[in-house]
Amino acid sequence: MQIKSVDLPGVGRKYTIETGEGCLLVIIIHHNGHRELYTMCHVDDDEPRFALEMNDETARKVGAILMGADYQPVADERVEIMRKNILVEWIRVEPQSSLSNLSIKDSHVRSVTGATIIGIQRGVEVIGSPDISEVIRPGDVLMAIGKKEQIKALEALCRGEGR
């Protein structure tokens, strides 16, 4: 796979991705956040086979999905083992939570509960794979992964119980 990018003066930036099948995916990101996606079967095609336009919010949500923020495909044998042992949950941070207004690093969520924060939904914004410096805010919905007891411990912290 080959990715090329070029600035489009007055417009934004264009990315051209050649897929393993020899097709092209063209992504144009406008300065205002608007995105355009096109697929073409041949480099010389004048008309795209598929076209899609997205606003900034939708593009970020789709990007989080493509990053695997809430779903990671796994080989069949491991799926059953993981389903029995590992949970992925969305947990709302209440205003009285001891996690409110702390960075992920300073909250020590992983060492205290064993659960790992893998995403944050903040209003309409979705933050996939948040940096440890990201501040947890009241009203955030944390996407966390862990064993059942680890998730329960994190849920309690998010409700304002413990610590």
Image (cartoon, helix red, strand yellow):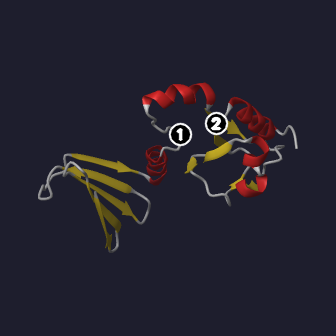
| Direction front: furthest residue | 77
Secondary structure of the residue carrying numbered label 1:
loop
- The percent position of residue 108, horizontal first and vertical second, equals 77, 51
Point 79% across, 45% down: residue: 112
* Number of marks in the rendered image: 2
Does residue 53 sit above or below 70 in this rendering?
below
- The percent position of residue 8, horizontal first and vertical second, equals 31, 71
Point 14% across, 53% down: residue: 42
Please identify the quarter of the rendering in which residue 5 is found.
bottom left
Pointer 1 and pointer 2: residues touching (CB < 8 Å)? no
Kind of residue at disc 1:
Asp
- Which residue position holds label 2? 90
Q: Which mark is residue 156?
A: none
- The percent position of residue 114, horizontal first and vertical second, equals 72, 42
Frontmost residue, 14 versus 155: 155
Mark 2 surroundings within 10 Å by alpha-carbon count, few (fewer than 14), some (14 through 19), many (20 or more): some
Kind of residue at disc 2:
Trp
**Which quadrant of the figure contains the C terminus?**
top right
Secondary structure of the residue carrying numbered label 2:
strand
- Which callout, 1 or 2, points at the residue further toward the start of the chain? 1
**Which quadrant of the figure contains the N terminus?**
bottom left
Please identify the quarter of the rendering in which residue 75 is found.
top left
101 left or right, relative to 4:
right
Point 46% across, 54% down: residue: 56
Does residue 10 sit above or below 90 in this rendering?
below
44 left or right, relative to 106:
left
Point 21% across, 48% down: residue: 21
158 left or right, relative to 125:
right
- Residue 122 visible in this rendered orientation of the protein: no
Mark 1 surroundings within 10 Å by alpha-carbon count, few (fewer than 14), some (14 through 19), many (20 or more): some
Q: Which mark is residue 70?
A: 1
